[in-house]
Amino acid sequence: MAILPIVTVPDPLLKTVSTPADVVDDDLRALMDDMLDTMYAAPGIGLAAIQVGRPIRVLVMDLSDEEAPPNPKYYVNPVITWASEDRAVYNEGCLSVPEQYADIERPAACKISYLDYHGAEQQIHATGLLATCIQHEIDHLNGVVFIDYLSSLKRGIAVRKVKKLVKEED
Ligand code: NI
């Protein structure tokens, strides 16, 4: 278990299209464990492997309340098999774009097929925050960050603020 450095914008790594995992083995589970530690420490509610510099189609998430026991979820090779025409707007943030938030509109519900922590095939029908979060994370696997949906002006402002923040932390 380890806390890994998180890649922030405008690092070109975040534009990488990640490749599917061949197999869910102990090495991949070790990566997922480290990603979960990294996400909890940040703290955040979702993390894609590319955000710790690994271009593999793997996500971890935990949407449980702060007071509730941890409820980690692991998604390997997630695929959106259906998305609703209904749309929903959430004020999104991202550990790769620290302290920046924006209203983003996405399908309100979706179906996802994926492999779980043990490599078993699973499907979920996601609504609400789960639907938003998993679409945000799958975007990362395709090299897309939520600020890519903003105007170039707003995106530029967000990137400059992150660069300044990261510089101050060094
Ligand atoms: Ni993100």
Image (cartoon, rainbow, N blue to C red):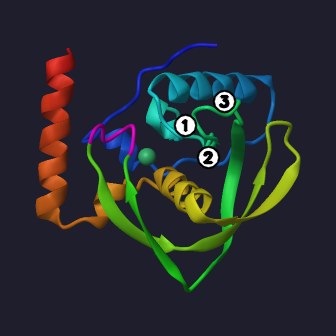
Q: Does the Cβ of the disc 1 residue fall within 8 Å of ligand 1?
A: no
Q: Do the numbered discs 3 and 1 sit on residues whose CB atoms are within 8 Å?
A: no
Q: Earlier in the sequence, mark 2 or mark 1?
A: 1
Q: Are marks 2 and 1 in contact (CB under 8 Å)?
A: yes
Mark 1, secondary structure of its residue: helix
Q: Is residue 91 above or below residue 87?
A: above
Quick one: quadrant of the N terminus? top right
Percent from the top left, x then y, of residue 9? 27, 41
**At label 2, which amino acid type do we have?**
Arg
Segment colored magenta: 94-99
Q: CA distance from mark 2 to mark 3?
A: 11 Å
Q: Residue at x 61, y 81 (%)?
A: 84
User: Is the C-beta of the residue carrying label 3 under 8 Å from the nearest atom of ligand 1?
Assistant: no
Q: Position of residue 78 (x, y in %)?
A: 68, 55
**Which label sits in the foreground, 2 or 3?**
3
Disc 3 designates what residue?
32
For numbered disc 2, what is the local secondary structure?
A: loop
What residue lies at 71% left-to-right and 30% top-to-bottom? 69
Residue 60 or residue 140, whichever sits in front: 60
